Image: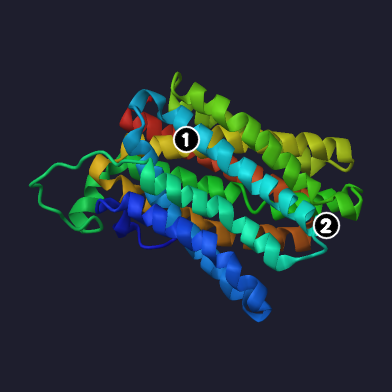
Amino acid sequence: MATAPHLYSTGCRRPAVTTDRLHTALNPQHLHAAHNYLADRRLLDRVGKGIRGAPRDALVADITPPALRGAAFGLRQSLDTVGAFLGPLFAVGLMLQWADDFRAVFWVAAIPGLLAVAVLALAVREPRRETGRTRTNPVSRASLKRLGAPYWGVVGVGAVITLARFSEAFLVLRAGQAGVPMALVPLVMVATNVVYAASAYPFGVLSDRISHGELLVLGLAVLIAADLVLAAGEQWRVLLAGVALWGIHMGMTQGLQASMIAHAAPADLRGTAYGFFNRVSGIAMLPASLLAGLLWDHFGAAHTFLAGAMFCLFALAGLTAQTLATGDHR
């Protein structure tokens, strides 16, 4: 997620996304031949995700009317999340049906990526750029200064939110503590993603109608509630409520932050803006998960989720300060 943000503001958004989708489609074909290189392939897949994210979001912002950007990003999040949990379930079904034939499953896995490449190449058209305009370095000091305080405020708040929303793997660990049978523990992530996918588009539509800041505050409040419920939960019913709140928070905030960046950054620097946002968020995820792991090992699950709630309060304070400083109530 922290890959070359300067590439995305140079008018190469559609080719960048197309190339990465082709890489994603073909990458699984190597897995069946070299199990020893599984970690390397996984790393390449994550690099591909980092390359794909910024130009994809910049392209969505470019081709969507401003009044519908929240809905567009919400729909993108919903579809992305649906694919994330339906894909593995479909793969499990194929493995059972085809007696663990990895080669066949990987070939089937390439089909969605190739379809995405075809759609990008044949059906998606980038808006025309101004002709005769001198192209500048998007990561120069002057360009970064043009991003402005509102954008950097969104980046800062996003980083603190990442610290508060550490890896979802801790939801799985909490499920084990709550007495969920080991075989059913992975369904915690399925439940989270179902709620996330179901809520992202409606909240995206809502973000086009109300203040971005107000909706982000509500999203942070929901995450605080999720942390408190998960901190107190010792039974699976309580855990389920916390997981549902966590998914709702994701639906409220993920697409919203992408829409806020499109609103705050200059159009010609949107790719760079998304690239730096993804870079900062990716970097923040590492200390967030490390801190959560240390708290979990030394103080237990409750303190881990309470710490997440505390970071949420910091994010709320930063968001309030940003709104007061910029006067931007969109």
Residue where numbered disc 2 is placed: 96
Label 1: element kind:
helix
Q: Which mark is residue 43?
A: none
Residue at the image position 47 percent from the left and 56 percent from the top: 21
Q: Which residue is mark 1?
A: 73
Q: Work out which residue is located at the far left of the displayed protein and give it.
A: 132
Residue count near mark 1 (Cα–Cα under 10 Å), binned few <14, some 14–19, many ≥20: many
User: Is there CB contact under 8 Å for labels 1 and 2?
Assistant: no
The percent coordinates of residue 146 (x first, y second) are 22, 46
Question: Which secondary structure lies at badge 2?
Answer: helix
Task: Pick whichever of labels 1 and 2 is earlier in the sequence.
Answer: 1
Q: Position of residue 297 (x, y in %)?
A: 77, 63
**Whole-percent x and y of residue 290?**
63, 63
- Looking at the picture, how far across and down is residue 26, in whole percent? 53, 64
Q: Residues within 10 Å of mark 2 (few under 14, many from 20)?
A: few
The residue shown at (64%, 77%) is: 33
Residue type, mark 1 in image: Phe
- Residue 44 horizontal side relative to residue 289, left or right: left
The residue type indicated by label 2 comes to: Leu
| Left or right, 80 with reference to 96 | left
The one of 97 and 25 positioned closer to us in this rendering: 97
Q: Is 241 above or below relative to 9?
A: above
Quadrant assignment for the C terminus: top left
Q: Quadrant of residue 313?
A: top right
Relative side of 30 to 168, left or right: left
Residue 288 visible from this viewpoint: no
Q: Is residue 169 visible?
A: yes
Q: Above or below — where is 279 with respect to 120?
A: below
Instruction: Report the mark closest to the observer, 1 or 2.
Output: 2
